[in-house]
Amino acid sequence: MSRVELAGIAKRFGGVVALAGVDLAIAPGETHALLGENGAGKSTLIRVLTGAIVPDDGEIRVDGGVRRFAHPKDARAAGIAAVYQEPMIYPHLSVLENIFAGNEITLRGGMIRKAAMAERVRPWFARLDLSDDLLDRPMGRLSLGYQQLVLIAKALTQEARVIIFDEPTSILSQSETDRLFAIIRRLREDGRAIVYITHRLDEIGKIADRVTVLTDGRVTGAARADELDETKLLALMAGKASRNYGKPRPDRKPATETPPAFEIKGLCRGNLYRDVDWSVPAGRVTGVYGLVGSGRSEVALAAFGALPPDRGEIRLNGARIAPRDPAEAIARGIGYLPEDRKSQGIFATKPLEANLTASALFRFVHAASRLDFGGLRGEAARLIGRYRIKARDETIAIGTLSGGNQQKALFARWAGQSMKLLILDEPTRGIDIGTKDEIHDFIRELAASGLPVVVISSDLPEVLAVSDRVIVMRRGRVVTVAEGDAMHAEAILAAAVGTHARAA
Amino acid sequence: MHASGFDRTRPLLLLVMAAAALGGFALGHPGIVSTQNLDSMAVFGIEIGMIALGQTLVICGGDTGIDLSVGAIAGLAQVILGRLLHLDLAWPVAIGMTLLAGLVLGGINAVAISWFRIPPIIATLATLFGYQGLALVLTGGINIDLTHESPLFLAIGQGHVLGLPLQLVALYLPLLAAFAFLQHGTRFGRALYLAGTNDRAADLAGLRASRIRAATYVLCGLVSTIAGIVGAARLGTARPDAAGEANLISIAIVVLGGTGIFGGTGSVIGTALATVVIGIVDYGLSYNDFNPIYQAGVIGVILIGVILVENPFVAWRDSRRTNGA
């Protein structure tokens, strides 16, 4: 019998389907790897499993019995715990206090019984080969690897029988990774069920017994790990890209030797990216694909003056530029649509008009620096019509619109001006398919009008759908540039995740 | 909806409060509604009102923007002016130099906050003590007598135009108009609202949020200086502790006037109305022989009271709007 079984789990956020009926069975004594791109629904699935969100539909069964997790403590009581990618800790509290945060063993009246808590933790620390001396240390002094082990100890202390690891190795060194794998194997031998989420295909063979692939909120592939090699895994993961919405555009331009309109050479910044070269021709869409942490957004921010590079050259139409802030980059004709709509893009409580014109105010100034309000309203109305933004009028607060319409408005903020280069970072993240297609069409139109356009995305089908060429980045470096026939899902994915299997 | 995010409820509420306060005091002491008394009220309110205009811009700029040093700037400016006048400089020259000093004092706040990224509450708390201390050093703790200065200078705080206080007509109202235009009519004002709403988004839209905020601290220093000069001319003396209470009362007025403490909303118009309310209440309490030690408490009660009255009303209105939509 499965320890945990999910049946038909569905969850929508507004108009966006995050999970569309997911079935998943996790057996005791087994490590179950969950694969999928960003936005495939993995994190939503974890949040359902840990009781952080309640699914709209579907059933969760624990040891055969149907359970309803209305609150994280329900999941905890059912023996489910998660160890997240970035450890969530209280840095100033001791390790022991972190382990029992919110769950302290107390006397009546609230006095904390430290000795009893230490007693409870000790056997688990021994099981993880951790020294008891750690218990009194401030959590913040520990390395990330040790913090993670403490959180595993915390899960064990709570008698967790299902432990979810969310990309645990992304922050670990090689030796820490080896140690973690040894511990995961031990936990599995204890009969615990392990859910292991990762991007790294090379880890599958080392740790997983079973693999499930999630795409667009659905299970699109499942297999026993020993039946898979890397080529088959890539085919499973790229499955979605061969589906309809990812099919290449008929107007995709052939490979060319046109001189670049925008060019980056040997760009470096600390450990974010190194020796990055981008060559972006006019009249084409250049896709930049890479997983989170590949340095793609940071390179874009360098060109936009928001995060200056340590070294290297940026050229726009042949002239070397080094913008010191976004205002200067904009004055030079560079537009940048940021990846995080809420925190970097919209002014939520402000009218649509102010949002649409925020980067174009200088064009609407009368004498004595008086704003031309009529001109601003007219421009806003034009953009609303041109980019089919669904809103009552331009005075409505942008925060009240749907995510797709907010995104269209941010897109229009740049697309509606005459720029010399547009960099679009995750232009369709978290929005519905219909709006996605519309924005893709707008992007193609921009390129067709002769503009160099860069589309940064961790959505592979999107990159394939809009780009004429693709730059692939991994861990701060450009690993390949694909054009024409070389642009297909398996090859790009293989380059981005860094396997040795280069699908032909 | 306007870019200012300014709600019309608050100004109406303030007008009602001003009328009610005046009416209430008149019940106790009908004599309060005399030309002379209204004139005195205006004179008392003008200096703190000017400071509150600058404070409004600072708070509107967001990113925890606040200027705790306004009163200290007003006091130090007064002292600088007094010292300059005692050097037998012509009073317009002395005032010009004092205004320059005010720009520097505000500029120090701006640099500390926008350049060195010191949180505003810490930076201006530090300058509050620094400026206060400097004012004491410059005077040795003794008030500087200015009663023998040019009558033209003293007229800045004591003169009348068409029966109205000169500083109201010639200084406060023009400043209010200028600040209202700056806030609601210019690119700077629009950028200020956007920076106050979402700092990072404003930067990425090319609006240079931290420079805009820096400018608000300089402007705030300038109006605080003007307030200090007016106060010196009004009383014919320069005191290092002249406007000590302004540091916090100016913030109370701004918040009472409907400017959101987290930035991005509000208007100097609301601030001006709130100044009237506080002016009437303050003067009315003194006039009715209330012990002055209660006055600060009354301001606190008004502040909380307005929000308690307004919240249910706004909630009721918004629920009607949502249902209607």
Image (spheres, rainbow, N blue to C red):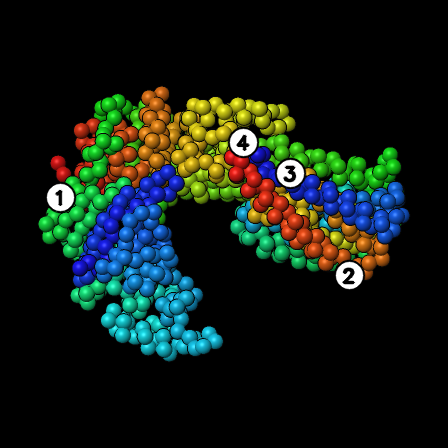
For the residues labelled 4 and 2, the Cα–Cα distance comes to: 47 Å
Most extreme residue toward the left is A227
The label nearer to you, 1 versus 4, is 4
For the residues labelled 1 and 3, the Cα–Cα distance comes to: 64 Å
Horizontal relation, residue A263 to residue B121: left or right? left
Q: What is the three-letter code of the residue carrying label 3?
A: Arg
Label 1 marks a residue whose chain is A
Which residue does the numbered mark 2 point to in the structure image?
B293
Q: What is the three-letter code of the residue carrying label 4?
A: Thr
Label 4 marks a residue whose chain is A
- Image quarter of residue A150: bottom left
Q: Which mark is on residue A395?
A: 4
Q: What element carries label 2?
A: helix
For the residues labelled 1 and 4, the Cα–Cα distance comes to: 52 Å
Residue nearer the viewer, A349 or A488: A349
Which residue does the numbered mark 1 point to in the structure image?
A232
